Image (spheres, rainbow, N blue to C red):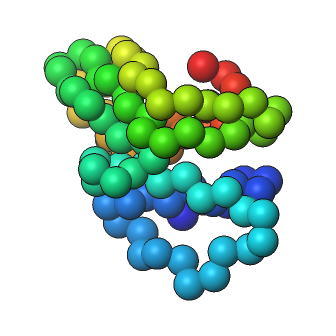
């Protein structure tokens, strides 16, 4: 779990659900779980396609809409969970 500003990022493959979410906190889940906010729709040796499955607002109050985003993988044994967490932060910060 990672807390950033009013956002809570949860790895849906490993983190347990939170018992209490603060008022106004935005929960974004990531992982290979089909119910995650951000997941992967395809994986090849050198590219993954991220899938944003639910709309949320970024830190600038702009909508991040459901979409697929191709990303190249630089390291062969990259940790998918870390990639998804970094992608979630990038979407929140409007860095994509």
Query: Left or right: 53 with respect to 65?
Result: left
> For residue 23, which quarter of the picture?
bottom right
Nearest the eye: 71 or 33:
33
Vertically, is 26 above or below 16? above
Please give the name of the residue rendered at 75% of the width and 30% of the height, measured from the top-left corner. 62
Image quadrant in which the N terminus is located = bottom right
Please give the name of the residue rendered at 24% of the width and 16% of the height, measured from the top-left corner. 46
Vertically, is 47 above or below 43? above
Nearest the eye: 73 or 68:
68
The picture places residue 58, in percent across and down from the top left corner, at: 71, 37
Residue 42 visible? The answer is yes
The picture places residue 5, in percent across and down from the top left corner, at: 79, 54
> Can you name the residue that lies furthest to the left here?
45
Please give the name of the residue rendered at 60% of the width and 58% of the height, measured from the top-left corner. 27
Residue 73 visible? The answer is no
> For residue 44, which quarter of the picture?
top left
Image quadrant in which the C terminus is located = top right
> For residue 88, which quarter of the picture?
top right
The picture places residue 8, in percent across and down from the top left corner, at: 63, 59
> Can you name the residue that lies furthest to the bottom here?
19
The picture places residue 54, in percent across and down from the top left corner, at: 49, 42
Nearest the eye: 76 or 8:
8
Query: Left or right: 58 with respect to 87?
Result: right
Please give the name of the residue rendered at 32% of the width and 60% of the height, measured from the top-left corner. 13
Query: Left or right: 45 with respect to 84?
Result: left
Vertically, is 42 above or below 89? above
């Amino acid at each position: 779990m990672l807390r950033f500003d009013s956002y809570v990022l949860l790895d849906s493959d490993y983190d347990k659900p939170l018992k209490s979410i603060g008022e106004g906190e935005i929960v974004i889940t990531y992982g290979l779980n089909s119910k995650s906010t951000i997941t992967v729709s395809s994986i090849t040796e050198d590219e993954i396609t991220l899938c944003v499955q639910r709309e949320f607002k970024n830190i600038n109050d702009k909508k991040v809409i459901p979409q697929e985003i191709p990303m190249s993988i630089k390291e062969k044994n990259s940790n998918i969970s870390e990639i998804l967490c970094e992608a979630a932060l990038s979407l929140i910060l409007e860095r994509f």
